[in-house]
Amino acid sequence: MIQVRDLTKIYEFGRHKHYALNGVSFDIKDKEFVVILGECGSGKTTLLNIISGLEKPSGGSVKHDGQEILTLSDEELLKFRRDKTVYVFYTYFKRESEGDGKYAELAKMTAKVPKTIFCDEPTEILDEAKGRHIFKYLVKLQKKRGLTVIVVTHNPNVADIATKVIKLNNGEIVEIKENKNPASVDDIGWTPFKCADG
């Protein structure tokens, strides 16, 4: 289980402070398929980076199975990420989508059977067919292995395949929705990607 409490991330530019995240709190249960949804600049990628241990917040708490990851040493944090998580960057697909091995690296990354997969805009530079293929793979992997999958996306249609949707706007949660009957990937609509900031 992932527990996030009062998470803030502040960037200072001279006298100006920008709240990328402002008091964000939520829980993610084991084996959930979670979509973090928001427009460009809403704070969704910053949030994903913090809860996966890639970035430090300005304040708040992030616990994985009761363990506070924000107080871990660099060595402990590296072990946590290596043993329990996989982080899929959208830039990976740019490399792999050009040849026959476009999904081989994703399969290789998830072969270690992590507990949680974090995905940052995994279909950003893919066409619709390839994008749907990726989400089918993630859904299948989540169900087959009982993993927790957390996906950041701008695409509101993807929310329909999730068991939980966390919607962000200007660094704050505006809605958390449970979905007891997720749609299949084939049944959702598709929205082309429009920007790269998250």
Image (cartoon, rainbow, N blue to C red):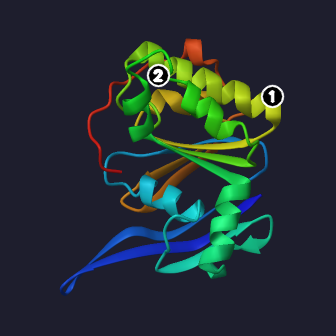
Percent position (x, y) of residue 71? 64, 82
> Is residue 192 left or right of 55 when viewed as pictured?
left
> Hey, which quadrant is residue 20 in on the image?
bottom left
- For label 2, the residue is 131
> Is residue 140 left or right of 146 when viewed as pictured?
left
- For label 1, the residue is 144
User: In front here: 73 or 165?
Assistant: 73
- Amino acid type, residue under disc 2 in the picture: Gly
Q: Is residue 2 visible?
A: yes
What residue lies at 41% left-to-right and 46% top-to-bottom?
38
Q: How many marks?
A: 2
> Hey, which quadrant is residue 191 in on the image?
top left
What residue lies at 39% left-to-right and 40% top-to-bottom?
91
Above or below, 160 relative to 85: above
Secondary structure found at label 1: helix
- Residue furthest left as drawn: 14
- Amino acid type, residue under disc 1 in the picture: Lys
User: In front here: 58 or 52?
Assistant: 52
Above or below, 34 relative to 49: above
Percent position (x, y) of residue 181? 72, 26
Q: Dividing the image into 4 quarters, which one contains the N terminus? A: bottom right
